Image (spheres, rainbow, N blue to C red):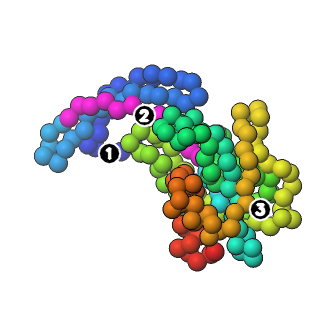
């Protein structure tokens, strides 16, 4: 944090439940040299990683389906989201995290995920940076049923889709998760599938 145009005055914790919610009071210097004092609420969520598993031979991908309360509160009829496998880093590095999440959520043992980018998910309100990965899969790599961990309040359905059908599901509004859309488009743009 070395922006000379920002002076953090105070950080007040508003909630420390599943994620932290802080209210940050800061001064910001505009181009005309005027300083403006403002407050912003920031969710401190920790960083995460996500992965899209793909099969070149069959032209298929693996996604998950699970309930997401924030989407439900914002008009997603049943709150169910079709997404790429993802999880919080916690104390892991991104590669260790995504290999573990892929096994827990999809049941596939991934050996060499390829990092394609990292990006902030919603920088106006959330501190989270997401590390995006892709990896090839085949049915020989399936070592369990997946579905997530009940100890983490997860209940996921593992789905295998034709790649072109998944792209159509974006247009049809059936896939509305930005991580998933980004990685599906990445595979298309790179000509991988």
Q: Residue 34: which quarter of the image? A: top left
Left/right placement of residue 99 relative to residue 191 reads right
Left/right placement of residue 98 relative to residue 69 reads right
Task: Residue under label 3, please give it.
Answer: 111
- The residue at 77%/34% (across/down) is 150
Give the mark, 2 or 3, whose residue is nearer the N terminus: 2
Task: Residue under label 2, please give it.
Answer: 42
- Expressed as whole percent of the image width and height from the top left, the position of residue 24 reads 36, 29
74 or 88: nearer the eye? Answer: 74
Any part of residue 103 in sight: no
Q: Give the CA separation, mark 2 to mark 3.
A: 35 Å
Contact between labelled residues 1 and 3, with CB atoms less than 8 Å apart: no
- Expressed as whole percent of the image width and height from the top left, the position of residue 96 reads 71, 51
128 or 174: nearer the eye? Answer: 174
- The residue at 41%/39% (across/down) is 125
Q: Is residue 8 above or below residue 61?
A: above
Q: Which region of the structure is painted magenta? A: 36-48
Give the mark, 1 or 2, whose residue is nearer the N terminus: 1
- The residue at 19%/44% (across/down) is 30
Q: What secondary structure is marked by label 3?
A: loop
121 or 5: nearer the eye? Answer: 121
Task: Residue under label 1, please give it.
Answer: 3
Q: Specify whether residue 80 is painted magenta.
A: no
Q: Specify whether residue 38 is painted magenta.
A: yes
Q: Give the CA separation, mark 1 to mark 2.
A: 18 Å
- Expressed as whole percent of the image width and height from the top left, the position of residue 142 reads 84, 58
Contact between labelled residues 2 and 1, with CB atoms less than 8 Å apart: no
Q: Is residue 180 above or below residue 122?
A: below
Dot 3 alpha-carbon crowd within 10 angstroms: few under 14, some 14 to 19, many 20 or more:
few
Q: Give the CA separation, mark 3 to mark 1.
A: 39 Å
- The residue at 39%/27% (across/down) is 23
């Amino acid at each position: 944090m070395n922006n000379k145009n920002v002076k953090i005055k105070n950080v007040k914790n508003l909630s420390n439940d599943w994620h932290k919610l802080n209210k940050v009071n800061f001064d910001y210097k505009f181009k005309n040299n005027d300083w403006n004092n403002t407050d912003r609420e920031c969710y401190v969520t920790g960083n995460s990683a996500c992965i899209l598993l793909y099969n070149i031979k069959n032209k298929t991908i693996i996604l998950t389906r699970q309930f997401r309360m924030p989407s439900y509160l914002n008009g997603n009829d049943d709150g169910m989201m079709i997404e790429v496998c993802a999880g919080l880093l916690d104390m892991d590095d991104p590669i260790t995290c995504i290999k573990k999440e892929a096994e827990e959520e999809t049941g596939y043992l991934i050996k060499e995920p390829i990092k394609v980018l990292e990006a902030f998910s919603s920088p106006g309100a959330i501190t989270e940076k997401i590390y995006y990965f892709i990896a090839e899969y085949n049915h020989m790599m399936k070592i369990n049923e997946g579905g997530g961990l009940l100890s983490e309040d997860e209940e996921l359905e593992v789905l295998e889709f034709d790649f072109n059908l998944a792209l159509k599901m974006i247009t049809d509004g059936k896939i509305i998760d930005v991580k998933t859309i980004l990685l599906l488009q990445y595979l298309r743009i790179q000509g991988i599938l």
